[in-house]
Amino acid sequence: MPKLVIVESPTKVKTIKKYLGSDFDVVATMGHIRDLPETRLSVDIKKNFTPKYEIIKGKEKLVEELKEKAEKSSGVLLATDPDREGEAISWHLAYILGLDTSEKNRVTFNEITKTGITAGMEHPRSIDQNLVNAQQARRILDRLVGYKLSPFLSQKIRRGLSAGRVQSVAVRLIVDREEEIRAFKPEEYWTIDAKMLPTGSRKAFPATFYGDSSGKLKIENGEQANRILDDLKDAAYQVAKVKKGTRRKSPAPPFITSTLQQEASRRLGFQAKRTMKAAQELYEGVEIGELGAVGLITYMRTDSLRISEDAIAEVTAYIENRWGKKYLPDAPRHFKTRANAQDGHEAIRPTSIELSPDKVKASLSNDQYKLYKLIWERFVACQMSNCLQSTTQADITAAGASGEEYLFKASGYTVTFDGFTVLYEEGKDEETEDEGSLPPLENGMKLRCKEIQGNQHFTQPPARYTEATLIKALEENGIGRPSTYAATISTLTGRTYVVREGKALKPTELGEVTTKLMKERFPKIVNVKFTAQVENDLDGVQSGESDWVETLDRFYTDFDKTLKQAKEEMKGVKIQLKEDETDIICEKCGRRMVIKTGRFGRFIACPGYPECKNVKKLVQENGAECPKCGGKVVVKKSKKGRVFYGCSNYPNCDFVSWDEPTQQKCPRCGKTLLKKKGKKPKYYCVTPECGYEKVEDGEE
């Protein structure tokens, strides 16, 4: 009789069967099979928080099939995912199938390859009860917060609200940032920017005003800038000092779950949920031509930067063969994992360096290919040599008419050896202007000022969070775990606590009102440090240092007291959300309709509810006229959340555009100008035959 191997995902089954052969029968649970039922709390608080698990609805037939297969097999191996959730699923399976949890019937696969599966099968172990207890504690903790706090919020603010231990803190971060932005008072400042030409050269380079003989000088207004510019009208410029150096730029470490989500957001525009879906598929196995089903990456839920010596040896040989020995560092790179990280798995890397993105592209979906290319390039680059840059910093003096000596500074670099950047460079959360190269400069060299002008600026408020920067903030503050970030962000937007404006995450009024109530009544639940400490306590359960029941009891005793006090002090209190009135008249009762926020987003409704139940879709206009029929242009979203523009007269008018129609008219033909976003937004005529276009600064 064959041995039964039970995994989580059905997409793994074919790949694993291929490597194990006919002596094994591989089946999938398709995720959890037993859980706390959704309809009730299902936790006996008085009996040491005993959970009351049930078979998940719809999985009864699967459970019976698993029992039958287990009875007919020569043994059962539990091969669910190698993390807390996977360990808990194996524990539930052992209970259902009557297996001894102390027996060595648990195997884990760090990668779905022949090597990874063979290694896992050769090292079976018993179920790790500490991992199971950590998962149980987290599940029960989140159930207690959700099921105790959500009804309170629904009663006080709006029906259908939910609260979560991690989601509430994430909303607070976004709300706090919005409050910072509102409170921000911009300050005016000026820069004086010049373009200098060395004697005999035609190529100008930029230099920026630094100060005068008293030191660095802040220019606070236009009058001050103009005084300096007037004094510099006939100034003679020369190089006072040149400082040269070498800068070494090191590659980023390989991906962990959080950095993969951040970089996929920055570079690919992927939401965290989309990233993890593609990563799961790459891990579980993809059909690659004659190779058949192959797992292309190692396990994608990890916060460890550890790399196996075999993987380092393989990538080192690949780099030397493709780029040469000079692209290798003196010694292989090993990256330090942060202190509170779990080191159960390696960093995310390709299972085989030889399977380059180009070789497997034809077998992958678009999302799979883009993400695999990112993972493959990042991993290869992390074992390559530094990028070397030759830097130049120049001090330039200018004698003003008043006798004052002014100082300008210029800096630049040239790449002397590209190193890892020949393949990959990490993305940035904020766009910055790159330094350019400078011409050869020497002390005492005379310069001619080709152009000089004062430029007004205002200090900018902090930027709203994007998915990438929010995930980074959650990780840095120790809130949640990388594997939960995608689900957390989906909850924030799905429950309309937060909306997306491009890549930015902006709190709704609902998010702000809920956060205000939470800060007033449940300060610990939305306290960043407290939430991080809870995560540390759960990690203590996983390592066996803490008892899971005691951990729950410490949290719940205080939480329950706070909740009872809030209920008592807010008896009869109902918080009203502000409703924005529109110009739309309800055709049923004549009232002005208002904008409301519901479970599925914002909509327009009659304020006469429940007497009048008239509702409409909320349509956002952008102020432009349809270039086809003259109707109003409305903002729409694709199924994947991408913004596009269409005519309000659809389906009678079929105008649609990814680029935004504007109120500006083409100076050549009078038609509508469309705006294409970018570092320098471009305006172009809607009529292709016209061909008119201009960039933001007005240059045609």
Image (cartoon, grey):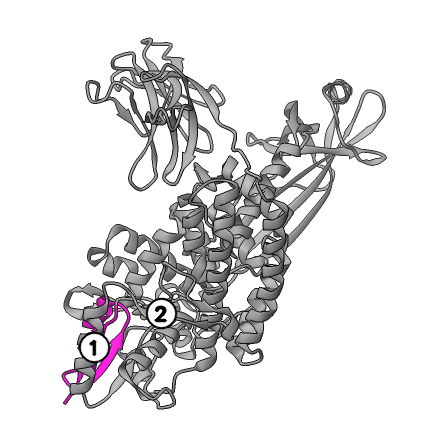
User: In what quadrant of the picture does the C terminus appear?
Assistant: top left
- Residue at coordinates 32% horizontally, 26% vertically from top-left? 616
Q: Secondary structure beneath disc 1?
A: helix
- Residue at coordinates 47% horizontally, 66% vertically from top-left? 140
Residue 592 in view, yes or no: yes
Residue 303 in view, yes or no: no
Task: Give residue 66's mark.
Answer: 1
Question: From which residue to which does the magenta span run?
Answer: 1-29
Relative to 425, is 526 on the left or the right? Answer: right
On screen, residue 5 above or below 338: below
- Residue at coordinates 22% horizontally, 69% vertically from top-left? 60
User: Residue 35 in magenta?
Assistant: no
Relative to 395, is 693 on the left or the right? Answer: left
User: In what quadrant of the picture does the N terminus appear?
Assistant: bottom left
Query: As shown in the figure, which amino acid type bears the numbered disc 2?
Result: Thr
Q: Position of residue 357 (x, y in %)?
A: 29, 59
Q: Which residue is mark 2?
A: 298
Q: Residues within 10 Å of mark 2 (few under 14, many from 20)?
A: many
Corner quadrant of residue 657: top left
Give the CA distance from mark 2 to mark 1.
28 Å
Q: Position of residue 516 (x, y in %)?
A: 60, 42
- Residue at coordinates 36% horizontally, 12% vertically from top-left? 666
